[in-house]
């Protein structure tokens, strides 16, 4: 295990958060399935990293029910009915046995840093569930809190909106990031960066586990990394990011 991952896991544990290492995707999925009781009701907070693991299918295959509102519009329901169905599932997923999601950044001193539009994804990490599991690719680990904010502001948020709305044709947003790929700290009513959270310790009432996978997952990189690695992270993200309608 690389030293920065070991340091991060130790820091999580010092904060009474379960820090688990997975050398590969099958190991990560096995650990998630071990943590979640088979008869638990699992709320999914949307996470491209979790989709890349394929763990939702593994959970459903063994009979564990997953409340997943982040499915393609053509999943059998259309239009207004689809929106109402999605709202209901998002609400139900905020209060159930377990919450499964990803994070924007994880600092080497064990802090989970996130920005969200509505707040449902971040709130589920610390409220409403006796068990919460966050899956993290090693590319999401950053040295400091300042670098977590910089990573989210300069890389993750603008790239996310640019890919979803500008490149993949998801719901349109008239925000600077969609037009240019750069954050303008906008005041748009369509701003997606409305809520910032930092989890600094085990949330009271939630058994929080963080599974660090020894590979790149989800969206996030340091601009100094080799271009091929960045291009690979971006391309993999584009394949599985959820497109709102
Ligand atoms: S603050 Fe506005 S411009 Fe910046 S990434 Fe968020 S939505 Fe885009």
Image (cartoon, rainbow, N blue to C red):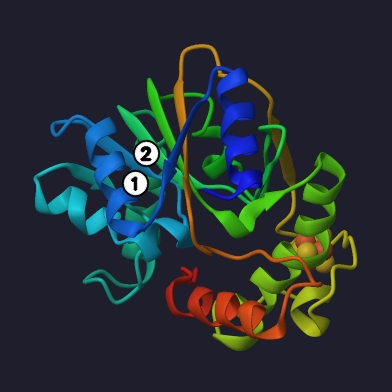
Q: Check the image and report above or below for 37 versus 116.
A: above
Instruction: Please name the residue that numbered disc 1 is placed on.
Output: 89
Q: In the image, which disc is placed on residue 59?
A: none
Picture quadrant where residue 225 is located: bottom right
SS under mark 2: helix
Instruction: Please name the residue that numbered disc 2 is placed on.
Output: 93
Mark 1 nearby-residue class (10 Å; few <14, some 14–19, many ≥20): some
Residue 140 at x, y percent in the picture: 63, 54
Residue visible at 74% across and 78% down?
A: 178
- Quick one: 168 or 155, which is closer to the camera? 155
Residue visible at 74% across and 41% down?
A: 196
Q: Are marks 2 and 1 in contact (CB under 8 Å)?
A: yes
Mark 2 lies within 8 Å of ligand 1 (Cβ measured)? no
Mark 2 nearby-residue class (10 Å; few <14, some 14–19, many ≥20): many
Residue 127 at x, y percent in the picture: 50, 24
Residue 171 visible: no
Residue 53 visible: yes
| Circle nearer the viewer, 2 or 1 | 2
Marker count (numbered): 2
Q: How far apart are marks 2 and 1 (CA)?
A: 6 Å
Could you tell whether 7 is left or right of 174 in the image? left
- Quick one: 78 or 223, which is closer to the camera? 223
Residue visible at 19% across and 54% down?
A: 58
Mark 1 lies within 8 Å of ligand 1 (Cβ measured)? no
Picture quadrant where residue 75 is located: bottom left
Residue 77 at x, y percent in the picture: 25, 69
Could you tell whether 42 is left or right of 121 in the image? left
SS under mark 1: helix
Q: Check the image and report above or below for 239 versus 197.
A: below
Could you tell whether 223 is left or right of 166 in the image? right
């Amino acid at each position: 295990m690389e030293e920065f991952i070991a340091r991060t896991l130790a820091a999580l544990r010092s904060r009474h958060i379960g820090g688990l290492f997975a050398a590969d995707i099958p190991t990560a999925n096995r650990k998630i399935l071990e943590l979640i009781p088979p008869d638990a009701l699992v709320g999914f907070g949307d996470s491209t990293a979790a989709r890349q693991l394929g763990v939702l299918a593994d959970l459903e295959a063994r009979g564990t029910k997953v409340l997943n509102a982040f499915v393609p519009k053509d999943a059998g329901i259309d239009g207004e009915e689809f929106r109402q169905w999605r709202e209901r599932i998002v609400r139900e997923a905020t209060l159930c046995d377990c919450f499964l999601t990803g994070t924007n950044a994880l600092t080497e001193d064990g802090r989970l840093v996130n920005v969200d539009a509505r707040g449902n994804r971040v709130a589920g990490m610390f409220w409403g569930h006796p068990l919460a599991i966050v899956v993290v690719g090693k590319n999401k680990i950053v040295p400091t809190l300042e670098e977590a904010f910089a990573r989210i502001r300069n890389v993750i948020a603008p790239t996310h909106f640019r890919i979803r709305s500008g490149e993949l044709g998801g719901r349109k947003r008239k925000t600077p990031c969609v037009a240019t790929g750069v954050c303008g700290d906008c005041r748009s009513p369509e701003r997606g960066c409305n809520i910032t959270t930092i989890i600094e310790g085990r949330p009271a009432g939630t058994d929080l586990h963080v599974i660090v996978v020894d590979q790149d997952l989800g969206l996030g990189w340091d601009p100094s990394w080799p271009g091929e690695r960045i291009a690979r992270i971006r391309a993999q993200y584009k394949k599985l990011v959820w497109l709102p309608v």
